[in-house]
Amino acid sequence: MNRRTFLKTASLAGASAAVLSETVKAGASLSSVGRQASDVRQPMILSTWDFKLPVNQTASRTLQEGGTLLDAVEKAIKIVEEDPRITSVGYGGYPDRDGHVTLDACMMDERGNAGSVVFLEHIMHPISVARLVMEKTPHVMLAGVGALQFALAQGFHKEDLLTEEAKKAYAEWLKKSNYLPPINEQNHDTIGLVAMDASGNLAGGCSTSGAAWKMRGRVGDSPLIGAGLYVDNEIGAATSSGLGEAVIKVAGSFLVVELMRNGKSPAEACRLAIERIIQKQPKYKDVQDFLVGFIAIDKQGEVGAFSYRKGFQYSLLRDGVNNVIDAEYVMK
Ligand code: GLY
């Protein structure tokens, strides 16, 4: 089920998705309004796309119930990972060109700690494994069989993550086996989430099954600290979605945070990072439906986003209200 079909089905089924959040048009002032330093801080949660799931709400509730930032990030992302209808993250994710579901995820906390897993198979919650890599090992990243071995040693169980729906889509893809599928509004990818707690501390996480029909072993931006996610508790946090190869080449999320360090607003920083990708790699302009989007939050609680192409959305929970916002973009 692609995103469009899923949305239609959810709505026909009378799912409560529509009441989870409001949608706000591109350029709405929401994306550029910050809080006053004197404001009493409430949790702020910013995440990529609108998965029609209570992602931000779960993170916010976790914080309000006394959970840590990492608890909030992990619990929220797990909801997307375990939903078989989401074909670009976790269980139900579309497989690689050899028919294997391989997952990538990372986390970063307010102290600059980081954990990541790449090319992980058979584990429903890569975000939880990434957290344990951070908390229980001297390393940042574990890959492939090593990541799986670590997960099993930590008590995770092997599961078959290839759903019937994903098998059907794979069989359909095999008929033509076109490589380099676009990552776009229909085949969108990462759940990237950054959270600010009541003390103004920041953390984030990212999880994906990566590009559908990718080469076996391919890893995108999402589990790479500095590419798919970066958190600097003094400055802000950023995360990305879209074609990972393009994001990696400019260390995209790190770039957004560094631009904020140099005085840019989150929205400006995201826009400049998109422009940097196009300036350095103009060939992406010719890739059909090419999409990369960034979202960012700064230490003052101002948020922003920018996308190469129309269609990228993000979800912002602020003052207890979740809004889905159409990001501004370069190309229609
Ligand atoms: N942005 C996810 C990926 O390219 O794998």
Image (cartoon, grey):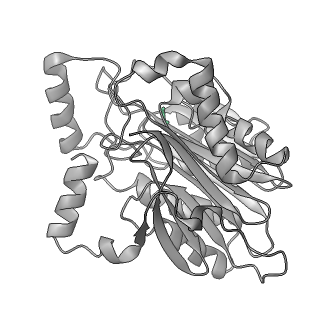
Tell me if I can see residue 154 in this picture. no
x and y percentages locating residue 17 in the rendered image: 31, 71
Relative to 249, residue 209 above or below: below
x and y percentages locating residue 294 in the rendered image: 58, 44
- Left of 260 or right of it: where is 270? left
x and y percentages locating residue 250 in the rendered image: 66, 26
- Left of 219 or right of it: where is 66? right
Residue 42 sits in which quadrant? bottom right
Residue, x 35% and y 20% (percent of image)? 180
Tell me if I can see residue 263 in this picture. yes
Residue, x 31% and y 36% (percent of image)? 94
Relative to 128, residue 72 above or below: below
- Left of 264 or right of it: where is 286? left
Residue, x 45% and y 23% (percent of image)? 285
Relative to 127, residue 64 above or below: below
Name the foreground residue: 186 vs 195: 186
Name the foreground residue: 234 vs 313: 313
x and y percentages locating residue 102 in the rendered image: 42, 32
